[in-house]
Amino acid sequence: MSPVDSLPLRCDHCGRPVRPTQHTRTDYRVDYYALHGGNGEVCPIIGDYARPDTTYVRLIDRYDIVSCAECYPLPAVQAERERRFRPERGRAEEAGES
């Protein structure tokens, strides 16, 4: 385990430390959401059984966002998620599409 792995997770928006999901017999409590994204490129799958039109998205650079349960539903945090995880929507709006 690296020294970074031993550090407690913190919300990227408010900075508070977050706890793992707590499970009981009948319920659970989520304290944070970890979102993983990044920029990718579409690549073909090449192999004996792959159809020529089969593709996947290869992750070029990865980024993670940790949002505590209180920050996750905030409008500013939702807007950031849309901007980072659905960049095509921002480009469509800039081009005047709806």
Image (cartoon, rainbow, N blue to C red):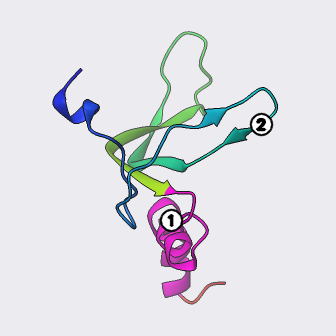
Q: Is residue 42 shown above or below 95?
A: above
- Counting from the top left corner in percent of width and height, residue 92 is at 55, 78
Q: Residue at x 36, y 52 (%)?
A: 10
Q: Residue at x 57, y 78 (%)?
A: 75
User: Left or right of 46: which side holds 12?
Assistant: left
User: Left or right of 27: which side holds 34?
Assistant: left
Amino acid under disc 1: Arg
| The label number, if any, that marks residue 95 in the structure image | none
Q: Is residue 4 shown above or below 29?
A: above
Is 65 within the magenta?
A: no
Of residues 57 and 43, which is closer to you in this image? 57
- Counting from the top left corner in percent of width and height, residue 19 is at 48, 42
Q: Look at the image and give the residue range highlighted in magenta.
A: 68-95
Sequence-wise, the earlier of marks 1 and 2 is 2
Of residues 66 and 81, which is closer to you in this image? 66
Rendered image quadrant of residue 27:
top right
Q: Residue furthest top?
A: 48
Rate crowding at label 1 as few (under 14), some (14 to 19) or many (20 or more) other CA atoms within 10 Å.
some
Amino acid under disc 2: Asp
- Counting from the top left corner in percent of width and height, residue 54 is at 59, 31
Q: Given contact means CB atoms under 8 Å apart, are the residues at marks 1 and 2 in contact?
A: no
Q: CA distance from mark 1 to mark 2?
A: 27 Å
Is 80 within the magenta?
A: yes
**Which residue has dot 1 on it?**
81
Rendered image quadrant of residue 50:
top right
Q: Residue at x 57, y 58 (%)?
A: 69
**Which residue has dot 2 on it?**
27
Main SS of residues in magenta: helix
Q: Residue furthest right?
A: 26
- Counting from the top left corner in percent of width and height, residue 49 is at 61, 12
